[in-house]
Amino acid sequence: MRLPYVNLRQRVNDNRTSASRLARASWSFSSLSPSPSLLLFSESSHLKKGQDHHCCCHASVFRRSLHSDAFSFFRSATNADTSDQSNSTATFISALITGLVVLGALLAVWLALRKRNQAVYAPRTIFPPPEKRAPDLPTNPIQWVKTVVTTSDDVILHSQGPDTYFFMRFIRLAVMIFGPFFIVTWLILMPIAGTGAANAKGLNKFTYGNVATTQQLRLIAYFLVAILLTRKLDASRDLRTHQPAIEILTLILRPLCLSIVYTLYLIDQEYHHYKQVRQEWLASPARANLDAARTVVISNVPEKYRSREGVQELVGETVEITNIWLSRIIGKMEDVYDERNKETAKLENAEGSVLALAAKNKRKNKLPEASKAADVEADSLIGQYIPKKKQPSHKRGFMGLLGEKVDTLNDSPAYIQEKDAELEKARAGLNELPMGDTIFVRFATREQAHAFASSVDPATTSTKDKMRVDKAVTAGKIEPGVDIMAEDVVWSNLKMAPAMRASRKILSWSLTIGLIIIWAIPVAFVGVLSNINSLSSTVSFLSFLKKIPPTVIGIIQGILPPVLLAVLFMLLPIILRFFCKMQGTVRKSEIEKQLFVRFWLFQVIHGFLIVTVSSGLPAALKNIKTQLPQLPTLLAQKLPTASTFFLQWLALYALTSFGLAISRAVPFVMSYLGFILSGPTPRKEFKFSNKMGAIALATTWPPVALLLCVGVVYSCIQPVITLFGLFTFVLLYILYKYTLIWVVDQPNSLETGGEFMRKAMVTVFVSLYLELVCLCGLFFLATDATGKRSKPGLAGGVLMALLLALVAVFHWHTTHVRFPPHECHYLQSTTPISAGHDASVGAYPPRKESKEDYEPPQDKNVEREYQHPATYEDAPVVWICDDTLGIGAAEATRLNELKIYASTEFAKMDAEGKVHVERGPPDQPWSDGIDAI
């Protein structure tokens, strides 16, 4: 006898086991790595013992980590039986109240502290050079918000660059998406689901799953709204939910014909804006003064082109080249250079420690004479304040742990001299070293630089140009990169051969995919720790854990999981960035773009797909032997309930991330601990007290894209989520706008001209694909009261499949036909640069530039500009404070006599041992302010 299909909306009391709850909870963490600032999540656990229900609330704060608290929150949200769905509502409300309370407290902190330390709350108003500083913010809170909201986004474009500008555009795009989503879903789907006959309770009352088997015609509204939300047109007035089913079906034809105009319209507008702004930025008068705008880095250059004559042949005989930098495989010279610089930093730290300890001993009258120390050297100024045995020392062995202990102040100068001699000898034979396959070329004009880069880059070259360029180039052997600064170069990767780069790229992606797969192991282990009390009761071989005192169990469950998961997800971007670097990429900005893709891949797989699937998998597998034919239906049945966790996540993320970032409580506290945290050296003090931070877009943008993805996918399944999606992105817009204009300073060297935006727009398409796939599954698996497939559901599934195909076609047309990569560059060439022909500038007028966009020319050694620093660079200055005891000046004199550059300029140490600096290190340029490079 064939087993009947289980109704998709039927509420089954599956009595989830602890193991199923654990599986669901353990996967939840991977989604949560927002990076705006400190985040807080509340936990409201509902434990069931007989008929008694106990509710507890726990709050924890972690910097740049939502994972630990979200794990506990998700576990609590999934512990309850489906028969008691009101628990999810209670959990949501209690957590939301907690989030509001925390937000209120953090806003109170902001109101109380923001006027006391401008260096924390508006550092861009004081630290940059005068012409680049941001205007002061009003002291009145209402005027403060008004100023932030009404300030044009173009300010970010001029002060920070296109990358962060388009990041704000992406958040703005999300607001524009969720605005209509919220209106349409709340007007149409909320009443339909809320009056459903499936008897769902709490938040589940408004989900797709509350449409009963006797109300299958109501499914029409879901795929109708799904179509409407894929066209971005105000057609909600045409929807009359009380019309007969036949009339509603006739309304489907019109939205279906216009479906591609949806986001699709918004996405098209964003691509057009991206193309226009990028071309205007590349052609701006300000960039005409930048040598980097005319410089191209070429990797994997064939051997026949590795000479000045070969480069001229490659770019064209009639193309004017002003400078060429040929790289060489320097081998051990790079290692000697790194060792020399590390030893210099070690010596500088030792000098700072000596000055601080001497000031302390003087202040507390703990001088060697007073203690009658026998090892005081009468002729040593340092020895008059610090005993010999307490002076800095270190070991020369492995990682400073093994080997003979040596006196740092005397041994390090000798070691630096030794490495300097080795470098001098190696540099003498530099011209004898083999040529590298990376070349830097500076053209006479920006037009020629961009034309050449476009003509040899397979990703940005039109088919017509590809047919005219050297076959070795079009085969992908040469990889160009325009707008390259020396600070953007990964010098250690220049020595790699093309074959090694290709093999390392395969290895890098293999490791990334493997990491995505095995990342479940540590997360699952942490999940075991977080639920160890329940497992000890349900798993027989863990029964011995019952003998452990409850206090210890509480520590294991409550403290270890959050700490371990915080560490795991803190390490994830570091590991992924290492994988990107190991494949031989020569630009740091390119590594960041690759990291964006991999981090997003990790986010969408662990943060959405696995959480969604695992929400129904444990319960579906419970009776797998008897219900195998029903497995797809059982999985689909659990999909709507998974939205509860994402709903809570969006709400609490918006409240806590906004509050913690705006309050800047941690930076405020750390600013007063600088005397302890910065150390006794002027270099560390300068970096700690004066240098502004930056937003790492490669790790900040993917979690924000995940928020958009979750909101879009569940917009029809759980309409309530659209409200919190809109609320979240409105707050994020205010938060990041304030941060980018008044707080951080993005490095110029990592600027890509908005290329992150093309990758981010792909995440919007992925969100649409996932939404339509989920809706296809829900519609196709829908059953009626007789257990047969629902005809309205089948019709909806077919329409969703057609819409999915239309979105895919639009995606391809947008990225390959309407806005191909080669048309989003400064130059549009119809004649190949390798043939020696000039090309014309793009037709877009330059954007009006502000004063801060112009960069004055600086004197520099052009010949060495793009050479490996190991081939010419001297050791960094040993920057020492000028202290009241005279030790700093004496040490600087001693080191200079040993031909080790040392200086006490711009740094002083008072009698209390506190360091004061006037500007940056003496060997670095200064323009009356800090400007990220």
Image: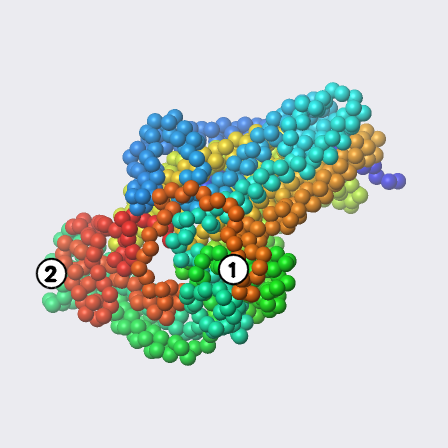
Instruction: Tell me which corner region of the image, top left, top right, bottom left or bottom right, holds residue 371.
Output: bottom left
For the question of whether residue 6 can be seen, the reply is: no
Which residue occupies 14% across, 54% down? 884
Q: Nearer the viewer, residue 358 or 524?
A: 358
Instruction: Tell me which corner region of the image, top left, top right, bottom left or bottom right, holds residue 749.
Output: bottom left
Q: Does residue 531 appear left or right of residue 393 in this picture?
A: right
The label nearer to you, 1 versus 2, is 1
Please give the count of numbered marks on the rendered protein: 2
Which residue occupies 37% across, 27% down? 143
Q: Residue 666 shows which numbered tag?
A: none
Q: Nearer the viewer, residue 142 or 651?
A: 142
Q: Nearer the viewer, residue 641 or 58?
A: 641
* Callout 1–callout 2 Cβ contact below 8 Å: no
Name the kind of residue labelled 1 in the image.
Answer: Asp
Q: Eyeballing the image, is 667 above or below 407?
A: above
Name the kind of residue labelled 2 in the image.
Answer: Glu
Which residue occupies 26% across, 66% down? 408
- Percent x, y for residue 531? 57, 43
Which residue occupies 27% across, 60% down? 923
Instruction: Tell me which corner region of the image, top left, top right, bottom left or bottom right, holds residue 788.
Output: top right
For the question of whether residue 932 can be seen, the reply is: yes
Q: Residue 838 shows which numbered tag?
A: 1
Which residue is outermost to the top?
242
Q: Does residue 115 appear left or right of residue 516 in this picture?
A: left
Q: Residues within 10 Å of mark 2 (few under 14, many from 20)?
A: some
Q: Secondary structure at mark 2?
A: loop
Q: How far separated are the C-alphas under marks 1 and 2? A: 79 Å
Q: Secondary structure at mark 1?
A: loop
Q: Nearer the viewer, residue 88 or 222?
A: 222
- Percent x, y for residue 914? 22, 49
- Residue under circle 2? 369
Q: Residues within 10 Å of mark 1 (few under 14, many from 20)?
A: some
